[in-house]
Image (spheres, rainbow, N blue to C red):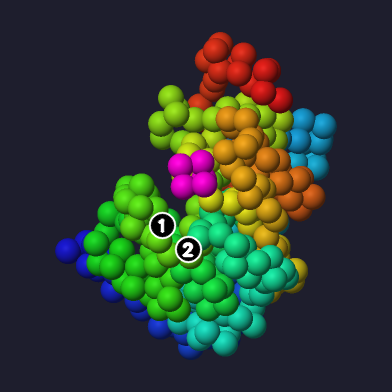
Amino acid sequence: MLSFLSYILFRFFVIIFYILPFRLIYFISDFFALLLRYVIRYRKKIILKNLKNSFPNKTEKELRKMLFPIYLNISDILVETIKGYSMSSKQVQKHITITNLKLMNELYDNYNGIIGVLGHYGNWEWAALLSGLVLKQNSVIFYKPLSNKFLDKYIHKNRSRFGVHLCSIYITAKSFEENKSKKTFFAMVADQSPSNISKSYWITFLNQPTACLHGPEKYARMFNLPVVYIFIDRIKRGYYEVTFTTVTEKPNELPDGEITRQYFGLLEKDIIHKPAPWLWSHRRWKHKPSSSENSYLTNSN
């Protein structure tokens, strides 16, 4: 019953945000960001700890100055995601564009598939909608199903309305196998903390030993697919640009772990250049390396 009520409440907000113009949803976002920062103090300790470890040369005053833009980003992504459930294809393509679509078209001509890796940076939800509208490739987006079955069914159907195929992360291998004969773009958000540490790649990321998901590199090598890094830049409020950067077109010619290090290196540069659009509230560094992993880090950098 509670799951169904949550679903009804969510649908109510989707309808309200459909009616509201963009300028009003950002007014709501401003207010919510103030609540997150000064009243709720959402994961403030986690955010500050992540910032301190990532930017050790910044003063306490400088780090605290970064907090409100980070909360505003969280709030903007929330309201934009809800707004996205009712946006038309024309609105999506107005608010988010691709700067170098030519690269993706060339990869379409030359390869059966592509793996796209991205972080929780910018508006990845709108980028997923856009991929189904403008890419020649069949778009497969991996996601984690919700425990609320009503919400999960609605969100799955809505996100797929422009031709994107949503696949559960729990059937990743099956999804690659089923789509290997098609020219498919597999999008994988790869910056979250892995659940299986034994299979993780360990790198130095934002000044810290970091366990990384092995999936993108594993499937790139298994199916011999080129890898591109996806950068989603907020050029102004409510408007984004997507840029693709080739990590490798020949994954099996690189040393083990090199693909992971390269795309995390690109993500790190983007975060250092503009920190606020990344999701700093994640418990990203909850795992610590063992002595053997420390050795691997030393030898691989």
User: Residue placed at 36% from the left, 47% from the top?
Assistant: 173
The residues bearing labels 1 and 2 have C-alpha atoms spaced at a distance of: 7 Å
Instruction: Name the mark on residue 184.
Output: 2
Residue 289 tag number? none
Q: 213 left or right of 53?
A: left
Looking at the image, is 253 positioned above or below residue 289? Answer: below
- Amino acid carrying label 1: it is Lys
Q: Position of residue 3 (x, y in %)?
A: 24, 62
Label 1 with label 2: CB-CB less than 8 Å: yes
Crowding at mark 2 (Cα within 10 Å: few <14, some 14-19, many 20+): many
Residue 277 visible within the image: no
Q: Give residue 282's position: percent from left, percent from top.
A: 53, 43
Quadrant holding the N terminus: bottom left
Answer above or below: position of 209 versus 151. Answer: above
Q: Residue furthest left?
A: 1
Instruction: Name the spot of residue 148 as percent of width and height, x first.
Output: 27, 59
Q: Which mark is residue 180?
A: 1
